Amino acid sequence: MTDYKVSLTGLHARNEKTIQATQDWERSRINEAALKATFDKDCDSIVELQKHVGAEFITDGQLTLAWQDLFRPISSGFEGVEPGPMVRWFNTNTFFYTPVVKGPISSDGNVLSRAIQKRFTNHGSSFKVILPDPLTFAELAEDWPAQPGESEER
């Protein structure tokens, strides 16, 4: 008999309560702490489901506030990259902020570590981080030229 290893990959759908909480937060009906509590509960449910089915690697389903889109850890954490306009990615019916490359890309090496909620790494299973591959990043990112007065070096 063949053994299979199971794991979720990518962005997991938010439940109705999380969707409503996001809309309420955007309309200033709830505060950020209430929104975070709703996301945390949703993420905990996803982690428990994965543990229940025996997933080899556990993921937060990219539901934490730091992972609102596939490129967020890169566009908000790396030097030389900024979040640009929001775009709908029709292939997956998701939204992302276009990564805008404004200069040489670099990091202190801890960007992803800061983006991961540590509570997901202490459950006895391996934790899986989903990142875009370099080709996807290159295809979907925009390269905005330096403005007058900014460095032209790339």
Image: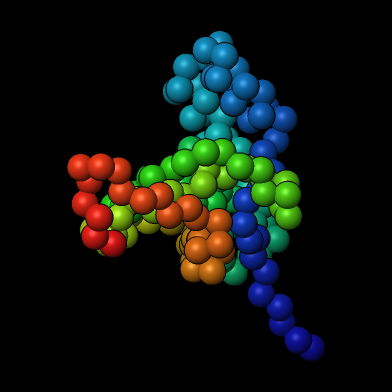
The answer to whether residue 63 of the structure is visible from this angle is: no
Residue 37 as seen in the image, left or right of residue 13: left
**Image coordinates for residue 144, horizontal then vertical, percent:** 40, 49
Residue 88, above or below 113? above
Numbered-mark total: 0
Q: Quadrant of residue 135?
A: bottom right
Quadrant in which the C terminus appears: bottom left
Q: Residue at x 31, y 48 (%)?
A: 146
Q: Residue furthest top?
A: 29
Q: Nearer the viewer, residue 33 or 2?
A: 33
**Image coordinates for residue 37, horizontal then vertical, percent:** 51, 29
Q: Nearer the viewer, residue 69 or 54?
A: 69
Q: Nearer the viewer, residue 148 or 41?
A: 148
**Image coordinates for residue 102, horizontal then vertical, percent:** 34, 51
Q: Residue at x 55, y 34 (%)?
A: 39
The answer to whether residue 10 of the structure is visible from this angle is: yes
Q: Nearer the viewer, residue 67 or 87?
A: 87
Q: Residue furthest front?
A: 148
Q: Residue furthest right?
A: 1
**Image coordinates for residue 129, horizontal then vertical, percent:** 49, 61
Please name the colour scheme applied to the rendered image. Answer: rainbow
